[in-house]
Every structure is written in C-alpha cells, then in structure tokens.
Image (cartoon, rainbow, N blue to C red):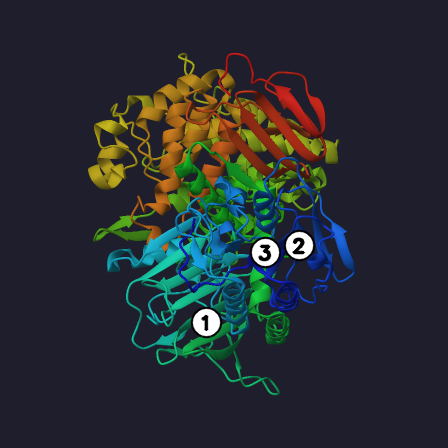
C-alpha cells in the first residue's frame, strides 16, 4: 500500500467509501454534490441498491462520475444527470478490482485511488490488485491494518480529508501520478554529464511535436527544449531542426535542489518534484495532448516566495495581438528553409495557503511556409476554456484507449516489458497526424538535435513497419513525405545520368541530398561517402510504401498515390544496373547497410532489394497497364541480378567479402561495439566484421528474395561477425534470429536494443532517442517472436518464443482490424473486432470472428 500521512499531500482522482458507516446521509449528499463538479470520481459502497442513503444522493452536475456498488461486487449502478443506470458486473471479481479496472480504462491508475475503510472489516475488500491504492481507515476500532494505512478517528475527520481533496483541486494544486514501476520511468536528479540524457528520456510528444524534459528554470540558449518533425532552418547539408520558442519557462529562487523526474508511460505525463514532497516544495506536471496535437499544458507549484511565472514564449516573443487578452503571448519563427511555426501561450497564477501555482497552456501551429497565428490563438482559446484538469483527463483517456488497442505484454520479463512500452511510447509521439499530412521522421524524431533531424532509411524500414501497427495514419504520413519529394529524387537520378528516381541518403525539407561530405570524429576529419554510394534507400522507400499498403490492406493506395514510387524506383534500377558479357546484371560501387565496407560491388542486400523493387513494380504495372513492355524488361533484369548465393547455401555479402580477413566480433570486444572506432576504419574494412545486418536484413525485409533455405546458413555465418555498431542492429538481428529458431540469443539482443537509450549504451542519447531502435524492438516481437506477416489479406502467424517467455500477448492494428494475439503453453488465440482470415504456420487459413483458438503452435517449433 502507499504510505499516506495523516494529511494527504497529494491529489487523488477517485474516492471509494462506504456510504452509511463512514459518512452519514447529509455528508454523503454534500460529498456527491461537491466532488463531482471538481472532476473527482466517487464510488459509494452499500449493502443493497435500495439503501436510502443512495436514494437520497443528488444527481452529479459535473464531469466527475458517481458509482454505487455492492461491497460483494454483485451489483453496480452509475448516477447520471438522467438518473441511475445499471453497470455490467463481472462474475467473481472483487469489487475494488472491478473499480480499478473501470478507472484504468479512463487513465486513472491505482495510485490515484483513495480507499476509505470502515469499521465493518472492509479489509476483506483489499486484494493484490489494490496494493498501490492510498488506503485510510475511518474510526479507531480496527484490528491490524495493512502497512501504510493512516487512521482517521471518525466521520468528521474523513469528511475533512475529502474536503481537503476538494480544496486541492479547486485551488489548482499539481496532480499526482500513479508510481507503478511497470509503467513509469523514474529519473533522479542526474549528474551534469547525464543531464541531457535524462532530458531526452523524459520527452513528452504528440503529432511530431516534442517537449524535452528540460528543467523549467533552465534557460541555457545552447539547448532546444521544443522541436517539431520537419521544421528546419538552413540550407543544403546545414539544414537542421529549428529550435522552437519555449513554453514552459519558470523562475525559481532559490533554484530547486535535487529533483526527480517521473515519466508516466500509461498517461503520457511528466512529473518533476523536488526532494521529499511536502507543502511548499517545487512540483510541476506537463502534458503534450494526444487528443489535441500541438497543445501543451503545465501546472507547477512551490512556496509563494520562490516561484514566479517565466516569460511566455521565452524566446522571440511578441505582445498579444490587437484585442487579445493581456495574459497571452505569441511568437512565430521565420520560415527559412522549412515550415514556420506559430505558438500562442496563456497562463494563470494562483495561491493556496502560501503555495503559488502557475498554470500554462500553449498551442503550436505548424505549417508552411507561414502558419496562421489566428489558428494557434483559436485553438489556445478552446484549450483554455477546457482548462488544465480537463486537458489532463482528456489526455489520460486517450492514452488509456491507446494502450487498450496497442500493447506488447510479457508478464514474465519485467525489464523487457517496460522497455517495450517505452518503445511504443516513443513511437506514439509521432501520432496522431492530420489526414493527408506528411511526416518527416528523422533518426531521432524531434526528441533531440541528433543528425540535425535528417531523414534516413530509419524512417522507411525501421520505424514505419512498427508504426503501421501502432498508428497507421502516421505510417501513411511517412510514405506521403517520400511521395511529395519524388521530383527531387527524379532530378537526382537525371543528374547522375539515370532514369527514374533516386532518393537521397539524407533528406530534409525539400528532398534534396543533404548528406555532408566530411564529418569530424574524435578530432579527425573523415570523408562521408554514404550520400554518394548507399543507394539501397531507393528500394527501401518503395518497400515501405508496399509494406504499408499490404499491412492496412489498401491496394488502391499502392495503385494510386504510391504508384510513382514503385515505378520510378524500378526505372532507376534498370538504368543503374550493368550487364556483363555473360548476361549477368550487377550493381557496382555501392555501400550496403554494413557501412564498415565502402565502395563494394554486388552487395547482397542492395541487389536483393533492387530485385524485389523490379518485380514488385512489374506486378503493379501489369495490373494497371497490361500492354506496357516495361514489366517484361524488369523481370528479365531482376532474374539476372547477381544474388551472391554460394555453393555452401549462404550468401556472400558482396563480391570479394569471403577473401577478407576472418574476424569475429567477440574477438574484438563484447558487442555492441563501434569496431571502426576501436580498430580503425582501414583495419575493419579489410576484415569480415560487419556493422549491422546486411544479408540478414534481406531475410527480414524480403525473405522471398533471400530464400528460406539460406536463412540458417546465413545466420550461422554473419551473426558472430556482427559488431552491432549501429543502434539499428540489435532489434532486427533479434527478429531474424528468432525466425531461425535461436530464440535465446534473440532475446538477449532484444534486451540490448531496448537498453540502447534507457541505459545510454552508445553515449549518444543526449542527442535524442533512437527511433529506429524503438521500431526495430517492436518488430523483433511482432515479426520475429510472433512471426506475423501479411499474405494477400491474410494474417499469418508462426510463434517462436524463448523459454523465458511462456506467455506473450500482442495488441496491434492490422488489415483494418484491432488484433490481439495471445500465446501461452495452451496454444495460440487470436481476437479481432472484425472478421479476419488467419493462418498458423503452414496450416490452412481459418476465418476468425471475435475470437479463435488456433490450437498449439506448429509441431516441432517452440511457441
């Protein structure tokens, strides 16, 4: 149980109390009449639904809900403005567990529930599921009570406690959050060298607008607390995400001592509090509204003499527009190379018994080239009219619905469980986006300035396949970003003397190549060749469009908006290939995903993706234009492209790879390791060490091009040679190893991928979260351990779980349905909200309506 003092220095959101024994009828009526308008939910327990105390309850007049329940859980009603209505009751579910389940659906965790025990032996109501509730006991005639339970001498003291809760809400004190370790990321005040890492980890974001967990009083001009996806400044390779005006600025004197940041993954809020919570200490809670993208809100409190409102916006500020309220301020950024941003911020200041509160609501409007300030002001007006408490409740409900719809549950692995939820939370920061919008997903999203916000293949191959299962609209926006930049890709191809479209290795505002030619690393200037030679991204972009269309089952999207992506990329590969005297086709002078080896010929991944691109475009064009001669030429070229398959049944990564010096990763250092920094680029390039999956990446994306028979030989050869020198590597490696039956190794790599940012394994998290690592980790579970794929509108499953995971539940979106897959020793169960064709392994497909038990996993394979 939580440990409440005699006076609760926290704000709860739901009160459970026995009506007759704890409060008399008059107090009960006043309780309902007062707490409901203050947005505090109340559950009254009574022996029967006809209890006159309940009958005398007034109908609620506010947003707070009032429920009446029997202590044995046998009946339940809800009071509404139109009268009582019956609630469904689950058989044999303890009443408090039922209350908590109902509250959780609205984003109210157990730590925000106050349970008042009566003298009637209500201890029997408590269960393991209620252990995090705040529990108090009314009266002094209780026997032994659970540890942490505070005693209140009688109904008058309990009424005073509830009156105090009402006062806290009316005086706008900072809300609390449920400190459930399975859902929270708790970061104590970090040392200076870790401060920026913690700010990155505690980012709150929605719709691609991210507010890093920068301290409200930190006004260091060198940091950018607010960034938005796709909003750039500068030109060419110097394009970088534009820092946006601050909205959360506060003045604190003296500055806080040690503070703790707690990121609540379940409700999407960040709580920062100073030392041991108590009256007058500093607290702040901020939220980025997922229900109103662009809207941010903050409430802070501290002793009145310490806390003063900061300037809003804290940079590039202007006065209120003509006729605007004086407590609002606004700012706009110049358009420069990218979209401009307007922000409008309003605030209010209050006082509660020596504690000052500051409440701030802001709205960012992103558009190009000049967003309408009036739009930001209008949306701010609506948000202010709703109020901070309503915005918080709205956000909680939205997050609760998200987690009910999409989640990965591994109850026997708490470390992986929290890591996977952090990965999903990171991806949720990209959603929702408006219909028909485009989303430039940089390598670090908008969570930091890393890679200047440039867009790599991370967006198409690592983020999109996970995002389409989490938020299909955001995945569609990623494809739309590429479609809108086809003209630049066509110009790039023509400049190199080729047909079709060649996409840049690094993209920003307009789709031109922005990869720098030189980079500084540990005091040395290095030549950067990826922009010139890492061409597989052209096929990766086409693959992402096809994967999206297949996963959501929208062939019209592929035949319509995405059609030029597939066709023009295929035309590029046809003109880019060379054919030797023997008729074999080649792609020379490339860099594959393994960037330890530059300027190689016939990279297996690049050739395989080009081959897939040619065949996929041929399939599409044959349906759309049966008389076109291009499909025949494309198929012929695809069939002649060198695949690198050796007589041993595995692929040679590129021409001449097998002649390089044999070297295993563990002979250098325990992976993950940046082997090129440790040994030098020349020495690593002369060896068989690889940075990240190359051949194995082909097996992951287009297994049909690699061939299933080569999977195990390729894994056996390349897995020991992979240094995992990229954040992209562990998750995808885990997915491929799981498919090859090496589930224990796969699980170890998944843990590495999940820890990349949480433990800052690469010493680069200060620059932003690795979105590709988050996406790859989700893919490792869904496509790897569960073996999910889509074939012609059918969901195909082939679960292979590690021994440490006897149970796994995955919830995601697929083929227009909400899908839940449960795997345990009893077999595989699929639940869906609409009819769905499902196939388990090589068995015949079945039509699942509602729920279907597919039986045990495929014979001879671990499930």
Dot label at residue 395: none
Estimate how packed mark 3 is, as few (under 14), some (14 to 19) or many (20 or more) residues with alpha carbons within 10 Å. some
| Quadrant assignment, res 257 | bottom left
Between marks 3 and 1, how big is the CA–CA gap?
54 Å
Tag 1's secondary structure? loop
How far across and how far down the image is residue 793, in percent? 68, 30
- Disc 3 marks which residue? 21
Count of marks placed on residues = 3
Q: Residue at x 23, y 36 (%)?
A: 682
Between marks 2 and 3, how big is the CA–CA gap?
17 Å
Question: Is 562 or 853 nearer to us in this picture?
Answer: 853
How far across and how far down the image is residue 278, in percent? 37, 66
Disc number lying in front (1 or 2): 2
Earlier sequence position, callout 2 versus callout 3 = 3
Earlier sequence position, callout 1 versus callout 2 = 2
Q: As drawn, is 795 to the left or to the right of 455?
A: right
From this viewpoint, which residue is outermost toward the front? 141
- Disc 2 marks which residue? 67
Q: Is residue 791 depicted above or below 207 in this figure?
A: above
Q: Residue at x 61, y 21 (%)?
A: 840
Disc number lying in front (3 or 1): 3
Question: Is 98 or 588 nearer to us in this picture?
Answer: 98
Q: Is residue 388 depicted above or below 491 in this figure?
A: below
Estimate how packed mark 2 is, as few (under 14), some (14 to 19) or many (20 or more) residues with alpha carbons within 10 Å. many
Between marks 1 and 2, how big is the CA–CA gap?
44 Å
From this viewpoint, which residue is outermost toward the right? 82
Q: Residue at x 33, y 67 (%)?
A: 222
How far across and how far down the image is residue 720, in percent? 31, 25
- Disc 1 marks which residue? 245
How far across and how far down the image is residue 601, in percent? 39, 30
Q: Residue at x 31, y 69 (%)?
A: 256
């Amino acid at each position: 149980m939580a440990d409440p003092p005699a006076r609760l220095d926290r704000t709860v959101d739901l009160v459970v109390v026995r009506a007759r024994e704890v409060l008399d009828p008059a107090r009960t009526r006043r309780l309902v009449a007062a707490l409901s308008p203050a947005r505090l939910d109340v559950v009254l327990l009574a022996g029967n639904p006809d209890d006159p105390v309940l009958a005398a309850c007034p109908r609620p007049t506010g947003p707070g809900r009032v429920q009446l329940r029997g202590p044995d859980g046998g009946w339940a009603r809800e009071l509404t403005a139109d009268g009582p209505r019956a609630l469904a009751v689950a058989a044999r579910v303890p009443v408090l567990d039922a209350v908590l389940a109902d509250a959780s659906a609205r984003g109210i965790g157990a730590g925000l529930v106050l349970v008042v025990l009566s003298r009637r032996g209500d201890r029997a109501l408590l269960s393991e599921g209620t252990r995090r509730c705040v529990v108090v006991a009314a009266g002094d005639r209780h026997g032994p009570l659970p540890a942490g339970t505070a005693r209140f001498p009688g109904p008058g003291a309990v009424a005073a406690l509830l009156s105090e809760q009402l006062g806290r809400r009316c005086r706008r004190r900072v809300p609390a959050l449920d400190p459930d370790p399975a859902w929270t990321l708790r970061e104590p005040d970090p040392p200076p060298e870790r401060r920026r890492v913690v700010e990155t980890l505690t980012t709150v974001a929605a719709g691609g607008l991210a507010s890093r967990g920068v301290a409200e009083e930190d006004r260091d001009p060198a940091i950018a607390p607010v960034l938005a996806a796709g909003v750039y400044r500068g030109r060419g390779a110097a394009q970088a995400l534009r820092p946006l005006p601050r909205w959360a600025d506060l003045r604190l004197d003296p500055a806080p001592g040690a503070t703790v940041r707690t990121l609540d993954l379940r409700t999407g809020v960040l709580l920062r509090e100073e030392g041991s919570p108590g009256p007058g200490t500093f607290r702040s809670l901020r939220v980025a509204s997922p229900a109103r993208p662009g809207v941010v809100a903050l409430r802070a409190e501290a002793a009145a003499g310490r806390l003063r409102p900061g300037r809003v916006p804290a940079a590039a500020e202007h006065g209120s527009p003509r006729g605007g309220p004086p407590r609002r301020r606004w700012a706009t950024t110049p358009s420069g190379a990218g979209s401009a941003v307007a922000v409008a911020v309003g605030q209010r200041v209050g006082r509660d018994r020596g504690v000052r509160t500051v409440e701030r609501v802001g709205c960012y409007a992103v558009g190009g080239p000049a967003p309408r300030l009036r739009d930001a002001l209008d949306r701010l007006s609506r948000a202010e009219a709703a109020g901070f408490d309503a915005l918080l409740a709205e956000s909680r409900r939205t997050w609760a619905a998200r987690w009910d719809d999409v989640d990965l549950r591994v109850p026997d692995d708490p470390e992986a469980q929290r890591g996977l939820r952090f990965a999903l939370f990171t991806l949720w920061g990209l959603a929702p986006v408006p219909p028909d919008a485009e989303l430039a997903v940089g390598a670090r999203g908008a969570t930091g300035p890393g890679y200047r916000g440039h867009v790599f293949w991370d967006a198409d191959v690592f983020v999109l396949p996970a995002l389409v299962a989490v938020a299909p609209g955001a995945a569609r926006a990623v494809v739309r970003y590429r479609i809108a930049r086809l003209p630049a890709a066509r110009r790039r191809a023509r400049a190199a003397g080729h047909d079709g479209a060649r996409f840049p290795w690094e993209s920003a505002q307009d789709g031109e190549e922005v990869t720098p030619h030189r980079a500084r690393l540990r005091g040395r200037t290095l030549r950067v060749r990826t922009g010139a030679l890492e061409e597989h991204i052209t096929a990766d972009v086409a693959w992402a469009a096809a994967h999206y269309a297949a996963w959501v089952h929208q062939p019209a999207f592929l035949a319509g908006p995405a059609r030029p992506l597939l066709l023009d990329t295929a035309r590029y590969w046809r003109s880019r290939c060379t054919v030797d005297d023997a008729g074999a086709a080649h792609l020379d002078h490339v860099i594959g995903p393994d960037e330890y080896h530059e300027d190689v010929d016939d990279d297996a991944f690049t050739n395989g993706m080009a081959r897939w691109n040619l065949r996929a475009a041929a399939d599409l064009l044959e349906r759309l234009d049966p008389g076109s001669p291009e499909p025949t030429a494309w198929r012929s070229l695809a069939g002649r492209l060198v695949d690198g398959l050796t007589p041993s049944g595995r692929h040679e990564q590129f021409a001449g790879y097998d002649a390089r010096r044999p070297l295993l990763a563990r002979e250098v250092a325990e992976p993950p390791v940046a082997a090129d920094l440790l040994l030098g680029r020349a020495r690593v390039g002369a060896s068989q060490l690889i940075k990240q999956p190359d051949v194995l990446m082909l097996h992951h994306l287009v297994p049909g091009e690699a061939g299933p028979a080569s999977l195990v030989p390729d894994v056996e050869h390349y897995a020991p040679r992979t240094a995992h020198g990229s954040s992209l590597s562990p998750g995808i490696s885990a997915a491929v190893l799981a498919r090859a039956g090496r589930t224990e190794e796969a699980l170890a790599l998944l843990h590495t991928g999940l820890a990349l940012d949480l433990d800052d394994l690469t010493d680069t998290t200060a620059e932003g979260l690795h979105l590709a690592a988050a996406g790859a980790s989700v893919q490792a579970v869904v496509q790897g351990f569960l073996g999910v794929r889509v074939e012609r509108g059918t969901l195909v499953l082939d679960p292979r779980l590690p021994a440490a995971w006897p149970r796994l539940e995955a919830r995601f979106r697929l083929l227009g349905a909400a899908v839940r897959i449960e795997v345990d020793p009893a077999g595989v169960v699929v639940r869906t909200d609409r009819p769905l064709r499902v196939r388990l392994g090589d068995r015949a497909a079945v039509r699942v309506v509602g729920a279907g038990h597919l039986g045990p996993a495929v014979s001879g394979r671990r499930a």
